Image (tube, grey):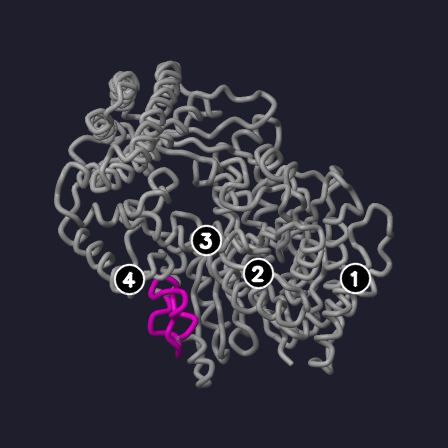
Amino acid sequence: MNQFQLTLFTVIIYSIKILDTIPRYHSMLTDQIKTQIRDIYKDVASALPNFRSRREQNYMVAEISKTLAGEYDKHRRIIVVEAGTGIGKSLSYILGTIPLALASKKKVCIATATVALQEQLLHKDLPFFLQHSGLNFRFGLVKGRQRYVCLAKLQMLVGAENDSQMAMWQTKPDKSQVEQLDALYKDYQSGKWNGEYDTLKEPLADHLWQQIACDKHSCHKQLANHRDCPFHKAREDLDTWDVLIANHSLLFADLELGGGVILPEPEDLYYVIDEAHHLPIVARDFSSAQATLRGAADWLDKIAKTSSKLQVQIKSNHIIAPNQAMQDHISDLTGLLNQVAHYCESQAPLFANPENRCRFEHGKLPEALKLPAENLATASGQAVKQFNKMLSLLNEAIKDGDIGKAIAEPLVTETGFMLQRLENLHKLWKMMAKEDNGKGAPMARWVEMITGSKQADFLFSASPIEVGFMLESLLWEKAAGVVLCSATLRALNKFDHFTHQVGLSLNDGSRYLALQSPFDYENNATLFLPQMDHEPTHDNFTAELASQIKALVEDETASLVLFASYWQMEKVADLLQGKLEMPILMQGSASRQEILTRHKQNCDSNKPSLIFGTGSFSEGLDLPGDYLTNLIITKLPFAVPTSPVEQAHSEYIKLKGGNPFLQLTIPDASRKLIQSCGRLLRKEQDYGRITILDRRLVTKRYGSSLLNALPPFRRVIE
């Protein structure tokens, strides 16, 4: 009996007991649904003679079902679940949502942050559940348009050099780029590639993929060239699915469009947002915008030519007025962008820092930029409006057969590409010019100088600081129900930090559940804080780290050392050069997968193995059993607010009389430290030692709260 089956069986037994205690009033948890759960039990029980009961997991199933059924609050069907490692949260939410969704004619959307979890759901969890549940449902993986190639764009970029091709290239391509795309096109034609980004044999530079990716404007199913494109082929089955697997970005792409465009309507969906601790950052990044000044002026010139081309091809008089208006708006936009560029050039001292960046304090633009920003927002909005009118006329002309296929298809691709860039320019300047609401956090706004070409360019960016209000209007108040879950949602043993980030509150009707891991932390793991001569702020700390790590990895077969920064990791590796009996498998020296494979091969051959990694290795790294018994954390994961958004957030909290260190840094560090420690015990029988080489846990006032938020390991503090 494998762990997966064991977990499912446990859910079933206890869910039946708990579901039988659910009150009957206003309930969608009918006897039929309970019977289905009993049927699952009967089908699986015969195959599993032994099982281990987990009360926490069963409680999670029942609470999810009751919340989504409206048992607690008919208008606020939202539950936030922190499920510790080993509870088996994916099976809990599958069992807690699918029977209810099928019975109430709803669908389930499971959104994750990582590809690994999507793959697990698609190839393991859902097929197993389908096989043994007695339920009849279909499921599949939904990917955004950006994950598929647009064949029309690819054809144009590798075709004969002409105006259309040059309009598509953002910068003049070199020979190797054209050859790379040509090879891709041939691979697709010969069936060696299916047109998905995730199945590329060789990695493609981001800017190149963006040139050939499918987009909502230029991908028209009515055109022959797009009818059989990879994106439309993939979407044909989506309407028949009962359970949809997606990533967080796709979820936001749909919500930003109003919901129900890519995914089903929010009111027909039970959303399960797994790995929900990523949600605030994904939401914030998705809501941000950026655009250059001189780069934008260059492609606006291309849009002007495209507009003129449209007037030539469309034989209707209706095209004349929008084209003329479009040319006027482009002229206005170009003049304004150049005006802002001249202003930035005259402010050289603002960019005299390592980042070449100027962040506008409290999000307020200088007086000299306020009017140009407003004018850019207005002119870009008008340009989008006129260009859309022209595209409507183009689509009509294609429908009526007035434009031949050979001209229509490249024209649709080119105009769609242009509209996307124009909309992005409008989004940025609208955010730049927007008057901030005094009740909430201001927008973070900044500009970076880009050097390297003949003339410096300037990249303007804007991002919300807090996204809770946006999530409330886009998701919480629209969805049929929402389950938010992760192994780490609380900070310092409280949900407060997370709820504030995502726009929920502890008394708004949402449910909150913190379920402890069933692992025997006290007997299976030791938390060791050795005596240290220096704290991380001291110049000699790095040298002391090297000597401590050397002693701690000797006679150990499977070690992982987590660093807070790349430079410190590399410095320690240099100091240990030639002093260890084992090679260091260092993050960056090979792909993550390659490092893990080599580490496991070493362990399987009884050779000592040592991995050095940074923050990204503290999450989602699964080394069960003897693959990791010695975990070393060099430093508390305090994030230095280096990004303009983080700096703006700290500034806003100070303005309100708060303390950014206590309100942002400490809660964030607490969650990350729990995640880091979570690398050691992955299964119930795992064991080992966690060493933290940061004495601030015992010397600083905040240290005890960070320590107390960790699982109850056996502690040894020197």
Tag of residue 34: 1
Q: Which residue has dot 3 on it?
A: 236
Q: Could you say which is closer to the camera, residue 203 or residue 553?
A: 203
Crowd tier of the residue under label 4, counting other residues whose Cα lies within 10 Å: few below 14, some 14–19, many 20 or above: few
Q: How far apart are marks 4 and 2 (CA)?
A: 32 Å
Q: In this view, does 200 lie above or below 316?
A: below
- Disc 4 from disc 3: Cα separation: 28 Å
Q: Nearer the viewer, residue 551 or 239?
A: 239
Q: Give the amino acid at mark 4.
A: Glu
**Within the image, what quadrant is residue 714 found in?**
bottom right
Find the distance from the CA under tag 2 to the CA under tag 1: 21 Å
Residue span colored magenta? 575-597
* Helix, strand or loop for disc 3: loop
- Residue nearest the observer in this picture, 453 or 634: 453
Q: Quadrant of the C terminus?
A: bottom right
Instruction: Please report contact status of discs 1 and 4: CB closer than 8 Å, yes or no.
Output: no
Q: Distance between the residues labelled 1 and 4?
A: 49 Å
Q: Which of marks 1 and 4 is nearer the N terminus?
A: 1
Counting residues from the N terminus, which is met first, the one under dot 4 or under dot 3? Answer: 4
In the rendered view, would you say 231 is above or below 286?
below
Quadrant in the picture for the N terminus: bottom right
- The structure residue drawn at horizontal position 26% and vertical position 46%, both measured from the top left corner, is 153
Query: Which is more N-terminal, label 2 or label 4?
Result: 2
Q: Is residue 128 on the magenta stretch?
A: no
**Numbered disc 1: secondary structure:** helix
